[in-house]
Amino acid sequence: MVCLSYRGYWTSHDRPSEKGINLDSEAALRWITKLHREKHKDAQAAPITILWGQSIGCGFATNLAAKTQDGDTLAINALVLETPFTNTRAMLEALYPQKWLPYRHLWPFLRNHLDSWANLGSIAAKAHKPEVYIVEAGKDELVPSDHGRLLYQRCKDLHLFAELHTVSGALHNDVMVRRHGKQAIAQSIASAVSRARQSSNDQDALCHPIIANPA
């Protein structure tokens, strides 16, 4: 497990920004790819790579999955999105629903424009399509209750494999504190690993007859 300390967070310096954090997450994936290829040159099976984001981190997880180029880095097998929102514009409108207030119209001037809705469209166009596991808080006080379901339906419309888990009674930041939240995250990861292994085994079975010299 690699936990990335973005710029401006924990002991990292500089100020956080969407552009900067995108660069940090891309650098992390390149580092993981390099490390794996150096230490596991003779590995028969590809590693299983899962991106896990929480809240605003979901936007950066989908950013990374949407921007990676097939073959340049390790393939991303799954996304675990904990308490995600569709995009920052929708969040601004949810926080300031009053039509007479100017705030809901200022989204072009925001410092970030995280858009998991649009990113899912880019992800669906890739040759290697990661699965999507959404874990929403049943009593989320920050993200509107329909955002998780909207993203789930978006995945279904794009023919992306997706699962939606709702943690009953959980607030935005305590999904992982609750037992059912931990179970939902663990179940999502276990399901992603199991399905990725099965897919890999199926591909090996299909390719095996035409391999002349496995060495």
Image: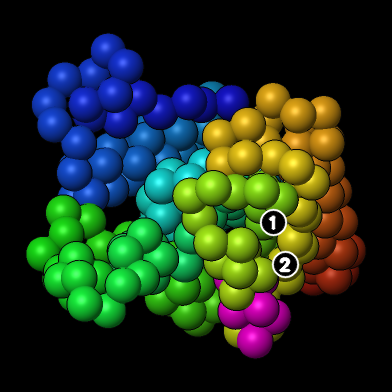
Which corner quadrant of the image does residue 42 belong to?
top right
Which badge, 2 or 1, is on the more N-terminal residue? 1
Q: Amino acid at mark 1?
A: Tyr
Q: Residue at x 76, y 53 (%)?
A: 166
Which corner quadrant of the image does residue 162 belong to?
bottom right
User: Is the N terminus in the top left, top right, bottom left or bottom right quadrant?
Assistant: top right
Residue at mark 1: 133
Asked if 123 appears above or below 132 in the picture, the reply is below
Most common secondary structure along the magenta stretch: helix
User: Is the C terminus in the top left, top right, bottom left or bottom right quadrant?
Assistant: top right
Q: Is residue 215 visible?
A: no
Q: Magenta part of the protein: which range?
A: 151-157
Q: Residue 162's mark? A: 2
Q: Are marks 2 and 1 in contact (CB under 8 Å)?
A: yes
| Label 1: which secondary element | strand
Q: Amino acid at mark 2?
A: Ala
